[in-house]
Image (cartoon, rainbow, N blue to C red):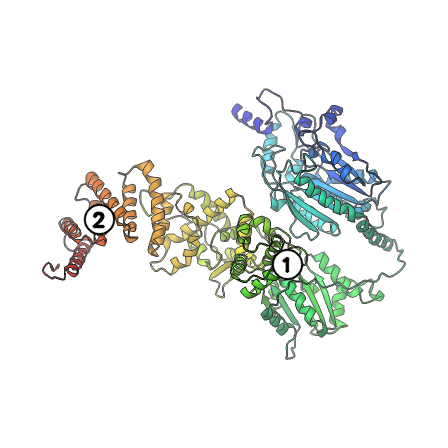
Amino acid sequence: MSDTRSHWKKILYPSSSSGNIDPPHLLADLNISKASSSKSTSKIDSLGFLDVASGTDPIVDIIAIHGLQGHREGTWATNDGICWLRDFLPSDLSNARVLTYGYDADIRSRECVSSQTIRRHADTLVKALSRKRKDAPRRPIIFIGHDLGGIILKWALVICNNQRLGSKGDLRDILTSTHAILFFGTPHSGIENAGLLEEINRLASLHMKTTDVILKDLREHSSELETIQSLYVAASEKIDCIFFYEEYTTSSKINQRGLSVPYHSAVIAGDRNATTIVLHANHHDLVRFPDKRNENYQTVLHYLKDYVATAPAGVKEKWVIEEGCRNAAKGQLTSQEVVQPKRRPPMSICYVERTEIETLITQKLLPIESVQHQRRCILHGLGGAGKTQLATKWIRDNENRFTRVIIVDASSQAQLEADLERSVRCLGPEYGKMTWEDAVVYLDDKEKGWLLFIDNADSPDLKLDPYLPASIHGAIIITTRNRGCIGYAPNGAIPVGGLEESEAVKLLHATANVAPKSHTKSVEIVRALGMLALAITQAGAYIRSTRRLDTYLDTFCKHRARIMRKEPGSGANYLFSTYTAFDLSFQHLPAKTQEFLKLCAFLHHSFIPSALFEQSVVSGFTAKTVLKGSPPPEIDKVFISKLEGVIGREWDEVTFQEIVDSAAQASFINLSTDGAYYTVHPLLQTYIKDGLDEEERMICTRTAAQLLLGAMRFLEHGNTERLQLLPHANGIPRSVQSENTAHALVFCEFYDSLGDWKACRELLESALSETLPTRGRRHSVSLWLTSKLASILSILGLFDEAEKMEREVLSLRLEILGGRHPDTIWAMNGLANTLQMRGRLDETEKIRRDVLALWLEILGGRHPNTIMAMHNLAYTLEKRVCASSSSDNTIQIL
């Protein structure tokens, strides 16, 4: 027990040199400047707001909120006490007042710990801020939130948003004045090691005061975080934000410096007002900059300067709207505001015609013959396939065929209802109080010839039925990643996948602004990008800036994750990068569906047999034992357990189909017409892989290998099923296939049946190199592997190596087992085969006769082994006859 406590104490207090030294004071451990720590003897003195810089005629407040185990000064300071908020910003942004806010974020302390929840911390923050800003309540605000500070800030803005319009509005003042937020490593979906931190707290409670109040709400996918996020969406609708995330993980020691917030938690998928930026730092140093020349500081300063410049005008506009809402709530409407129709999404200047799909849209929405039902078209497909651009282009070309085009953004239910409401209110002042329900009724009863464009209807939770007019006098076009939307118009569904090769190359050249003499490199690029419109647009933008089309693929292979998260740039009119577009759907999938797609990511992207999963379940996901002395290793149980967690211990077709359906609804996989095969977009596979660290990728690869090993256990004698599995087996690296002898032999047997001798050789050589050091050359497994490898080398024409191995095996068999043992006789036969392939027929004939004599003596003349030996000898003699053109030596074997 003492050893265990010592171990945890080292993790909790890594700066302590021995277990007898008391843990360092929290202030020192948080790198607070000496000046600050000398003034403060209690952490309570460092709570609330601190004026870091008053600014010269300030036009904006920059407010920084620290995170877990943080401090209002120390969080932003380096080990040398350099605090960029105090030492850099005042000279770079002299017209900004800089404040920091401190709250008790300790989860363990020798002094005291807070019992406040995240919400109570947020409530305290907004009330304190309201008091702090009473002399300038409308001054624009730019928030900086690190770690937990970002979560508390989100709750705070939700509290502001919930204040009634008819109240004094002191909290709504804060929300209206908030122009932008910079989130640094904020765990929006939780921290991965919250449970471990709780365990450390339990151990630390022997030495100090601890609390798990906040940690419980910071667990991954906690209901508290989900609630905060769902409410924050509405509160942040008119706020710009940046998600800064760390490039490097921190120490594995779990202390305040050891936290890591991975990319998927540090960003909010689907936030259209957000930019995502990586900083070259770990979580601890994400908000610490040693000097002004530091690249991370310059990046942050760039965005702060932009926000400071645009804040006054942006917040002034928000206050005009806010005052109108407050007056309306008080019954003080003075005039009817003119509501303008929502504009259609902008077209990319590099748009490439997709004639076939555009023709299909026309057939669905403008049929030649009259129809007795409402005309509908559903454009469905993977994020980034170009659905919105297709619909926008078609509407632009055909809007004169309709009396009115209503544009609706369905990325959220609130936005959908707001846009429908706007569509009816824009008809005139008399409609100023109409609701979205009134808009639907209006289209049903009072208007004809309209077109309703519902864009981004991606959420599987969004039910469109209440929002769809039923009138046959109008038409509806919907763009969605959710295949479930096909149900709204089964006959009007049009899948939008990759571009045609010629279209893809044309888009690449148009976006990159190049006209190469040869299309060879361009074709390679668009194929690597899976013909996805958004990915090609991103590639074109990158090539346009570098002017290097010829080297793009090399750069892409080395820095794929970073490139695929870059925004496409001006003129492209895509709101997201390729990977961000995938985030929007992937992060909302059920956990089992995500794990299923991770399995698919490590198989070949096309023709994944649905039977693969059933066969593997039936076999218990266990590998076949090819050689009695080499059973599957115990470690297999770890990966079998992972597979059971995704697919189940017993085959349940209904449950498995639910997993497949949820992946298909998000357009992440496509099913063949007979449902026998799945296809995954290759870029989705790279997206999944790039989201995993090296260890996670190895685990997923090994789990996919286990899935295949299970399916190979009971393959039929024919090669049809093997050929179906071949591309997926080839996707497993040879190092994984041969990580142990048992697996290597299963894969070897698989490739042997398909005649891939090169693969067999590599697997057997690997298995032999593993076996020889531990078992030696005389062991039966070593001899079997050597003999098998020799026969493969003979087939490959490497006769010298093969003969040497065969003679070594035979010599050892004779020595260990004697000349009459079946294994010795088989070794003789193996050597004879090799000699015959070399054309040394005299030696071959002699060995064949010896083999036949031994089998006759041991087994008799009717045993299959004896009969085979007769045929082998006859074949050798026939070869000799052909070689000598003489029949003198022929014999007849009965």
Numbered disc 1: secondary structure:
loop
Amino acid beneath label 2: Leu
Q: Is residue 117 left or right of residue 128?
A: left
Query: For the point 64% across and 76% down, which residue is it?
Result: 367
Q: Is residue 235 above or below residue 572?
A: above
Q: Which is closer to the viewer, label 1 or label 2?
A: 2
Task: State the residue position of label 2.
Answer: 831
The x and y percentages for residue 216 are: 64, 39
Q: Residue furthest left?
A: 888
Mark 1, Cα crowd under 10 Å, few <14 / some 14-19 / many 20+, is many
Q: Residue furthest bottom?
A: 369
Frontmost residue, 465 versus 8: 8
Q: In the rendered structure, find residue 458 and report the number of the disc placed on it.
A: 1
Q: Does label 1 or label 2 sit earlier along the sequence?
A: 1
The numbered disc on residue 513 is none
Dots 1 and 2: beta carbons under 8 Å? Answer: no
Q: Position of residue 752 (x, y in %)?
A: 33, 53
Amino acid carrying mark 1 in the image: Asp
Q: CA distance from mark 1 to mark 2?
A: 66 Å
Dot 2 falls on a residue whose secondary structure is helix
Q: Quick check: 117 left or right of 613?
A: right
Observer-nearest residue: 236 or 645? 236
Q: Nearer the viewer, residue 737 or 167?
A: 737
